[in-house]
Amino acid sequence: MANDPSHIANLLLRLHRGTLSDTDRQELEAWAASSAGNAALYRELTDEETVQAALREIERYDETPIRERILAQLPEAFSAVRKEGPPDVRLRTWRRTIFRWSAAAAIIILLGTGLWWLIWPKSPTVPVAQTTKPADIAAPAINRATLILASGQKVALDSIKSGQLATQGGTKIEKEANGQIAYIGTGGSAALLYNTLTNPRGSQVITLTLGDGTKVWLNAESSIRYPAVFIGAERTVEVTGEAYFEVAKDASKPFKVVIKDQEEVDVLGTKFNIHAYQDENVLKTTLLEGSVQVQPADGASPNQQRRSVVLRPGEQAELAENSNVVRMAGAVDTAAVMAWKNGAFAFEEATIKEVVRQLSRWYDVEVEYQGPVSSRTFSGEIGRNLTLSQVLHVLTKSHIPYRIENGNKLIIGSGD
Amino acid sequence: MRFQQGDPAAADILFLRYVKPLSFFVERLTGSAPDAQDIVADTFIKLLERRTQFKSLDNIRAFLYRVARNAAINFNLASSRHRAAHELIGYLARAAEGREDWLDNEQIRGEVLGAIYAEIEELPGRCREIFKAIFLQGLSNEEIAARMGIEIQTVRSQKSRAIGLLRAQLLKKGQLLAVIYLLDLLSVHA
């Protein structure tokens, strides 16, 4: 098969997809080394700019005359209109099983210069599958949240099928087909039945619809405590970690978020984000729509007057650790604040430690720093569905060394 | 596969994935855009007529490129008799002299680029349009948002989605590099 062009093409595609085996690699090397033309083609097809330029050229071709010629001979060849939306699922699934993701090493190699790797392949001759699998950590593929009912009973949400999962004081709790949790019905209970939804580290964002219709998105390593049915004059919930709220309007029942007994956010039909991780120094409340009032919690400043800040859309309020004064931070980039909900990490002049704290929650890794920590700051956005190595590749580009050990520990060096 | 069972929608998808890359390949071999259109149309007709015999998408891709290549060689040999096509001489000389390795390499290039292009074409509707605008047209997030009448946030999230769905790392690299570039720029003052 060595002389079959389609076979060589498949090897090159495996290289691009990080699924090249050791045997494949030797074969590809032998092919590239066998002639100057092959070596040149190899360089061309592993160079991003050249490939991108060729793909742009390909995109300019017009398929219409060809389609018409085919239809002239085979009138039933195609469906009448171009099908928009997801392509043939069966074709996709089939291909997926053939080319599984594997190697971060191959990715990094590709990101470097292609031929350099061909010339210098001798040192890491361990099979790709063995060296790379434990060295990388994939983004969370599922949600591993737990629901604690008023009785103290714990329900692991990923282990149950969609449909009704419990009732609390006459309110139904349902898991929807997309994994969201919803409280349905007003219930008949006169007592506040508190439930807690906890989303651990290394778990996808979970969405919750409370009894009043308020929607909550809960990031990894975050929790929310709320009554199954809101009774009384106020709707009060407590959060830890990071949560985004779209509060259902109810002028007769103000909505209040309490954070770590430290801060209170009073709201009325509005959209806002709370960032309150234990390991962050500053608690941040960001308003997207409506109006909120942010103040230190009741018990937080007994000897002082409670000073509050009223936010307008686009503004952020900060409460520093061990402080009881809420500070107005002014207008911020709300797209960056909300990146977590939209599948991305966004950093704005973030220190390496800030970056790594976000990564550790999402990929569920322990972090160890060796040597002094680089003082560089980072700004930019990157997909949360990438593997840890892919994200960290950005860091190494910034000359900060790292390595992953045992699949759960990230070691950061000091860099330059 | 639905394609084997004669589903026109499946034929449509295969056509859209490979028609442009094949046109590019055949035009490189023949040096003639209109003739390349004929050859590509004939190649797809042969594929549709033999649709039951394919076991996998890799088989289909190999078949398309082999048939198109043979048709291009035949075209070159035939046209050389009644056309003094100077622009063809280079191609003809190499093909006629039995420079099979040159043809093989054209086919390898064609197949690799074709499969990578097909990967982009496989992305779901809006995600595909947005990724193409970024990667193939070089538009900025802002330009895409303005042209498509959508929010920049949507452009960003669809881009992330595309990066998650694509398998060729090279297609993601540009996106990573954009971030790296930004980081390097902004970390200068650190």
Image: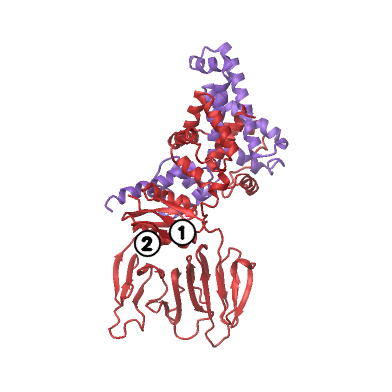
Question: Which is more N-terminal, label 2 or label 1?
Answer: 2
What amino acid does circle 2 point to? Thr
Residue at the far bottom in the pictured view: A190
Frontmost residue, A105 versus A15: A105
Q: Residue at x 61, y 39 (%)?
A: B14
The color chain B is rendered in: purple
Q: Position of residue A194 (x, y in %)?
A: 52, 81
Disc 2 target residue = A334
Find out whether the residues at labels 1 and 2 contact each other: C-beta distance under 8 Å: no
What amino acid does circle 1 point to? Asn
Q: Position of residue A405 (x, y in %)?
A: 49, 55
State which chain disc 1 sits on: A
Q: Is residue B31 above or below residue A266?
A: above
Left or right for B98, reference A405: right
Q: Secondary structure at mark 2?
A: helix
The color chain A is rendered in: red
Disc 1 target residue = A342
